[in-house]
Image (cartoon, helix red, strand yellow):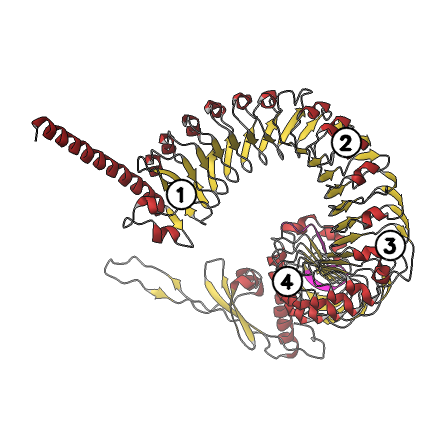
Amino acid sequence: MDTNYILLFAQLSLFILLHNHTSLANIITDEASLLALKSHISFHPNNILASNWSSSTPVCSWIGITCSSRHNRVTALDISSMQLHGTIPPHLGNLSFLSSLEISNNTFHGDLPQELARLQRLKSINVISNNFTGAIPSFLSLLPNLRFVHLSSNQFSGKIPTSLSNLTKLQVLRINRNFLQGEIPRELGHLRYLTVLDLQLNHLTGSIPTSIFNSTTMQVIALTDNNLTGKLPKTICDHLPDLEGLYLSKNSLDGVIPPNLEKCGKLQILELSDNEFAGTVPRELANLTVLTGLYISNLHLEGEIPAELGNLKKLQLLSLPDSMFTGSVPASIFNMSTLQLIDLRQNKLSGTLPSSRGMPSLEELYFGLNNLSGSITGSILNSSRIRLLDISGNSFTGQIPESLGNLEYLEVLNLQRNNFLSNSALSFLTSLTNYGVLPASVGNFSNSLQTFRGNGCKLKGIIPQEIGNLTGLTRMSLSYNELTGHIPNAVHGMSILQELLLSENHFSGSVPSCLGNVTSLRYVNLAHNRLNSSLPESLGGLSDLIEFNVSYNLLSGEIPLEVGNLKAAILIDLSKNKFSGNIPSTLGGQDKLIYLSLAHNRLEGPVPDSFGKMLALEFLDLSYNNLSGEIPKSLEPLVYLKSMNFSFNKLSGEIPIGGPFANVTSQSFLSNDALCGDSRFNIKPCQTKSTKKSRRKRVLIGLYTLLGIGSLLVLVVGYVVLRLRKTKKNASQADVCLVKEHERISYYELEHATEGFDESNLLGTGSFSVVYKGILKDSTILAAKVFNVPKYSGTFATEV
């Protein structure tokens, strides 16, 4: 073989060997970086990485890893939605070929390490839905190839760095749902390729930079739910030919809605709700022919709703509530076959509902709180897919069409506060007419019905057992009617019921014990009825109950201990009943309770000390009972307690003065004759020295009795305990302890020595005497035994 060929072959072999060695070293670097990441993951419920990321298998076969075939290096890391908890180590900066970093939907925390600035090939970073903190990383501006930045739903704070404008290739910037402050940098408008700017749900202030509206590539501008102010430019859409979504709701923007919006010809979603816009709805919006969602609610708009909006043939959602629109509902709206939602609530619309061919796609219709009149039109009845229908708070008249029963998808039907007439032929809809009853056929409603409201409809009769067939109900409200009979046990079949509101009726009988099995209940209001019997213990099973009100009934018996199990309750009202027995101490375990009223019952015994644990309590009414004992000082730490009433009981002792008691008046303690305390309560002061006077009286009576009848009743013996006297005769001579001889001690000296026989000097108590320690003026320590004085029926008989 030629020598040159041999040399060429050797050089080629050496090149291949060195190339393979270099490649091997680089992939080992990638492996070490990823194993470092694995070691920083403190919690991984599925253990996918623990079992898969191992040195025993090639890195490029690991889950979530993509390698390039050319360089055999890691180019993409995707460990999203793996429920990982931990931090991101700086070692990831060694993945020098990485172009895509996806770690979203986990619970990583801490900062993103500065070492990620080495990832010069990085095009996309996605850390959405984690718990990262600190400022927006400044190193992002050092990554020249970045196109997609997704930092949403974290805890980033501070200002948006203007240096992000250095990312000349950036297309998408999403930093919504963080805690960003300050103004939006006008430099972001200079990003010539930016298509999505999403800064929603932050705390941004100032006006929107006009440069943002000059970015011709922009497709989505999302700034909802900040504190932005100022006006929208009149030329807002002159340079936004590709804009598809404009989200500006929940700010403080003012001025008028610019008619120039019509130039955003590709606009599909327009959200301007909850701002300070005034004026009228521009008719020019009708030129947005591809618009699918129009949200301009809760503004200061007035005038009529433009009929031209009916030309929006692709519109699916029309939301114009909470403004001051007048005039009638445009008939053109009822001819929009694509509409799925119409919301015109709380305006000043008048006239009748127009008739039309119907809206086959309509699912939600809200016309409540207007001045509409007339009858329910066939256009509504032909919308067979309707789920929610609210026309409450108007002046509709006539009969409720029986064909409403054909709306098989109906979930919420609200017709209250209208002027509908009664018609006994209305089948199950009879229940919704004035002066009607609830027939058994009410159970024929669809199981998909979620809300059943008939407040203030003057309904009479009983609630039929068939109502238990409505197993899909989450809310049932029939308050302010004239319903009678018992609350049906059939409610136990409503296993997902959250609200049961039956107040202001004429129900009698007991509170159904089966309510305790409907564990989904959150609100129960049975107040102002004629319920009797006792409260069932089973109510303790409602561990998620928030409000429980059975006031103004005839309930009796003891309050069940199980009421203390209502740990989620913020309101409990058992007032105006006939409950007796003691207040359960278990009530004190409800640390979320804000309102507690047990007033106007027949409760007795003490106010439980455990009430001092209800730290959230703001209102406490125990008036008009037979409670006795002292008002517990344990209530003093209840710093949120604003209103308390202990009046008309048999309470005694001193009224506490600390904490919430510092701001109450005498009205809180009326008609408790044995209470004492501060003069501002208009009661007698407490006798703080009465015990000393009583003991002195006891000793004096004993002395008088001794002199009067010659019988020894009180013996006071002074013992000299140890009076030490030291002599200084000789250094070798021991100290001598001298005992002082017994000497006479007057009563005055004795009283002074024992500080008036104060309890602080009490040494012991026997069956017939007590012993006090005393110190005489010459420092002599003594013990004084005071014998009890017996009661006599003669001259010296007195209470001791």
What amino acid type should be assigned to the residue bearing mark 1? Thr
Locate residue 325 relative to residue 242 in the image: left or right: right
Q: Residue at x 67, y 77 (%)?
A: 791
Residue 271 located within the stretch drawn in magenta: no
Disc 4 or 1, which lies upstream in sequence? 1
Q: Amino acid at mark 2?
A: His
Res. 401 mark: 3
Q: Nearer the viewer, mark 3 or mark 1?
A: 3
Secondary structure beneath dot 1 equals loop
Q: Tell me which segment is drawn in magenta.
A: 639-653
Ranked by sequence position, the earlier of labels 3 and 1 is: 1
Secondary structure under tag 3 reads loop
The residue indicated by pointer 2 is 300
Left or right of 670? Residue 185 is: left
- Above or below, 131 against 498 in this view is above
Q: Which residue is mark 1?
A: 87
Q: Nearer the viewer, mark 2 or mark 4?
A: 2
Distance of label 3 from label 1 (alpha carbons): 63 Å
Residue behind mark 4? 566
| Quarter of the image that includes the N terminus | top left
Amino acid type for the residue under numbered disc 3:
Pro
Q: Residues within 10 Å of mark 2 (few under 14, many from 20)?
A: some
Quadrant in the picture for residue 509: bottom right
